[in-house]
């Protein structure tokens, strides 16, 4: 309204000046009459209620804004250009660019080029109106209704020029997109379209090739949207009858998301479709044939994988799996599968198994069993944190925590609750027996029940994180080394001096000295935490991969101290102590066919007759395999045959196929 009144005032001065020059012969009274008419016109406008004038201006602006912001096109058609999107869109495609919300529903952008059209129309109409008025200014000045029409029209033009005229001069490609980074979008204007093969591009061009923008991610497990049904808007009703390449084009165009393929098709059909998608994406980077040697059919049951083991599946990585043994362990013969790509590892561990069995076998024991989770809670003050710690240490109160925890599980048993205070923070390390499962999901669910109970006792308690890193999961930590986590296992064996010479190709004093100087003194000088061994992680990871364990937990599971002594009879005594070995025979990757078969080979597939027995057996087997690996490697180091063995058995000429 302010701009409108100012426009009237300026127009009044301009028209009065023009009238003096146009009608020099007119009388002074006539000039005054025209000015009076303008004054009367402005006064009549001023007499209108300001709210009505303001409402009219706002409504007009809102109507135009609504027209502008809702003029985007509908869903894309079916032409090939819809499938061959560039990443990101080129300038000419910015007008029809679409973004997607997290729910998967297409969100239309404003059609900014409308402003260019309206700018041209506004300028032309304004110029014509001024020319038309100037052609007979004296008549229009004396005609109040006509003058009011001109003033009203020019006021609308003024509002438009102030509010919308300059927007069209902004580069539409520079407007902030879904990722909030308009400048980055401009820099990617020359990206290579997905699906085009640029494998012949020069290295210099490859270095300068634009990066692909972030893909639509699959909802994480904790996101409630992951449980929502798939939104099928824009999905062709006959999609299952389409070819893999056609469906891949739908994914590339953004009409469907790749992580929805299993639900829209089926787990087996989704894999080749996704491979086609990634083939096109990799082709734009000059790596179009990267997946050709990645097998995906027919041995892996993707129905088992989906929803349990992996997302956005494109195939599987075959890892050679060897078998070591026989190894005599606790009076029984066991064979141990090891999946690895490191040459000599399986052969070396197998030599250790032979030496152990020749000496009468190994003996093992699980001395502690309990998976841990340590929620971090925060109190209002350090005194309240101390009060919570003391409360948890009262036996009667621990019984309440135990009851709350065990109400969430059939097999889990809360064994201890150890609080640690740091200022206002309390880290409550809960340790529970988890049967034959590794137990992370079990202990996490029970921990939430414990927190709810504590909140009822301490209303000021705030849960900071369900895992406060004092558990400690998948990180090197002294608490695991000292207090243990999962299964704490000890295994030992005595190797006759004759076997040390004939099988291990060294002597007892040499191997004992090597272990002392390397595993004990050397590791201490390095400041090792739980790493007083030769290569426990090698064997742990290989057995984990073969039996469906979580390979990332080899960090704490490989905590091991290897000790060797020469007995009074001159034989070799060896032991491995592993305080935090985390294994399970049910859940996770143990249900996959290949991993399940390896567990069957060990003799501990699934749940045991007594809950926890199979998981304990697997832990003892892993520790025994570690002992065999330690024995063989230390013997090779003592005899200085390590490099020779690797050069002989771990090398193959380039291009050799083994045929």
Image (cartoon, rainbow, N blue to C red):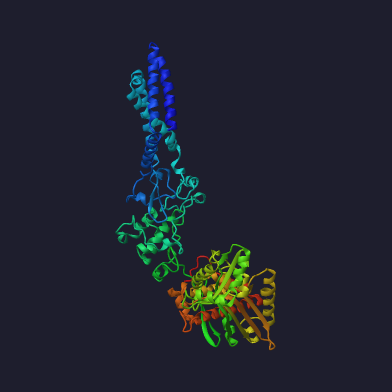
In the orientation shown, which residue stands out farthest toward the top? 25
Q: Is residue 507 visible?
A: no
109 or 188: nearer the viewer: 109
540 or 579: nearer the viewer: 579
Q: Position of residue 323 (x, y in %)?
A: 51, 78
In the image, is residue 244 above or below residue 441?
Answer: above
Number of labels in the image equals 0
Q: Position of residue 549 (x, y in %)?
A: 50, 73
Q: Is residue 138 visible?
A: yes
Q: Name the quadrant containing residue 426.
A: bottom right
67 with respect to 565 (left or right): left
Q: Name the quadrant containing residue 199.
A: bottom left
478 or 157: nearer the viewer: 157
Q: Quadrant of the N terminus?
A: top left
Q: Position of residue 110 (x, y in %)?
A: 39, 44
Q: Position of residue 658 (x, y in %)?
A: 49, 71
In the image, is residue 138 above or below residue 449?
Answer: above
């Amino acid at each position: 309204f302010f701009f409108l009144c100012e426009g009237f005032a300026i127009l009044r001065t301009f028209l009065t000046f023009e009238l003096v020059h146009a009608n020099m012969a007119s009388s002074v009274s006539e000039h005054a009459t025209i000015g009076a008419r303008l004054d009367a016109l402005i006064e009549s406008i001023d007499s209108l209620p300001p709210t009505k004038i303001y409402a009219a201006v706002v409504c007009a602006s809102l109507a135009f804004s609504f027209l502008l912001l809702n003029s985007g096109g509908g869903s894309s058609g079916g032409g090939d250009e819809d499938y061959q999107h560039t990443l990101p869109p080129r300038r000419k495609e910015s007008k029809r660019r679409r973004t997607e919300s997290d729910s998967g529903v297409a969100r239309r952008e404003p059609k900014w080029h409308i402003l260019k059209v309206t700018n041209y129309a506004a300028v032309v109409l304004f110029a014509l109106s001024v020319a038309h008025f100037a052609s007979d200014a004296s008549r229009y000045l004396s005609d109040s209704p006509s003058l009011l029409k001109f003033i009203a029209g020019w006021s609308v033009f003024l509002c438009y020029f102030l509010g919308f005229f300059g927007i069209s001069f902004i580069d539409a490609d520079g407007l902030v997109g879904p990722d909030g980074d308009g400048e980055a979008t401009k820099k990617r204007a020359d990206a290579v379209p997905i699906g085009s093969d640029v494998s012949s591009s020069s290295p210099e061009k490859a270095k300068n090739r634009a990066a692909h923008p972030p893909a639509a991610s699959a909802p994480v497990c904790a996101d409630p949207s992951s449980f929502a049904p798939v939104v099928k808007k824009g999905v062709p009703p006959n999609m299952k009858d389409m070819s893999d390449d056609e469906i891949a084009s739908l994914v590339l165009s953004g009409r469907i998301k790749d992580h929805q393929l299993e639900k829209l098709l089926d787990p087996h059909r989704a894999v080749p479709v996704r491979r086609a998608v990634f083939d096109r994406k990799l082709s734009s980077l000059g790596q179009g044939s990267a997946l050709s040697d990645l097998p995906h059919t027919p041995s892996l049951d993707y129905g088992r994988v989906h929803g349990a083991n992996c997302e956005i599946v494109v195939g599987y990585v075959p890892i050679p799996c060897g078998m070591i043994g026989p190894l005599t362990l606790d009076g029984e013969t066991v064979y141990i599968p090891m999946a690895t790509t490191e040459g000599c590892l399986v052969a070396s561990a197998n030599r250790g198994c032979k030496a152990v069995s020749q000496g009468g076998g190994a003996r093992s024991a699980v001395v502690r069993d309990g998976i841990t989770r340590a929620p971090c809670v925060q109190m209002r003050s350090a005194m309240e944190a101390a009060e919570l710690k003391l409360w948890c240490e009262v036996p009667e109160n621990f019984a309440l925590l135990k009851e709350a925890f065990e109400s969430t599980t059939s097999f889990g048993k809360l064994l201890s609750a150890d609080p640690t205070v740091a200022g206002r923070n309390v880290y409550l390390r809960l340790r529970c027996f988890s049967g034959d499962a590794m137990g992370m999901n079990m202990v996490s669910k029970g921990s939430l029940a414990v927190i709810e109970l504590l909140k009822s006792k301490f209303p000021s308690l705030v849960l900071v994180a369900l895992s406060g890193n004092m558990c400690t999961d998948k990180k090197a930590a002294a608490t695991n080394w000292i207090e243990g986590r999962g299964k704490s296992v000890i295994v030992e064996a005595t190797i006759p001096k004759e076997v040390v010479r004939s099988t291990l190709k060294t002597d007892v004093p040499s191997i004992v000295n090597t272990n002392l100087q390397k595993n004990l003194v050397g590791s201490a000088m390095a400041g090792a935490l739980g790493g007083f061994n030769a290569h426990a992680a090698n064997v742990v990871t290989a057995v984990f991969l073969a039996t469906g364990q979580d390979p990332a937990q080899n960090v704490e599971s490989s905590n091991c101290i290897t000790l060797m002594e020469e007995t009074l009879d001159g034989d070799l005594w060896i032991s491995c102590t592993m305080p935090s070995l985390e294994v399970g025979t049910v859940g996770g990757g143990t249900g996959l066919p290949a991993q399940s078969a390896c567990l069957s080979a060990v003799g501990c597939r699934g749940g045991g007759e007594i809950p926890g027995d199979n998981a304990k057996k697997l832990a003892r087997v892993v520790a025994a395999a570690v002992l065999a690996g330690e024995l063989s490697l230390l013997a090779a180091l003592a005899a200085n045959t390590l490099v020779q063995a690797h050069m002989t058995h771990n090398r193959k000429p380039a291009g050799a196929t083994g045929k």
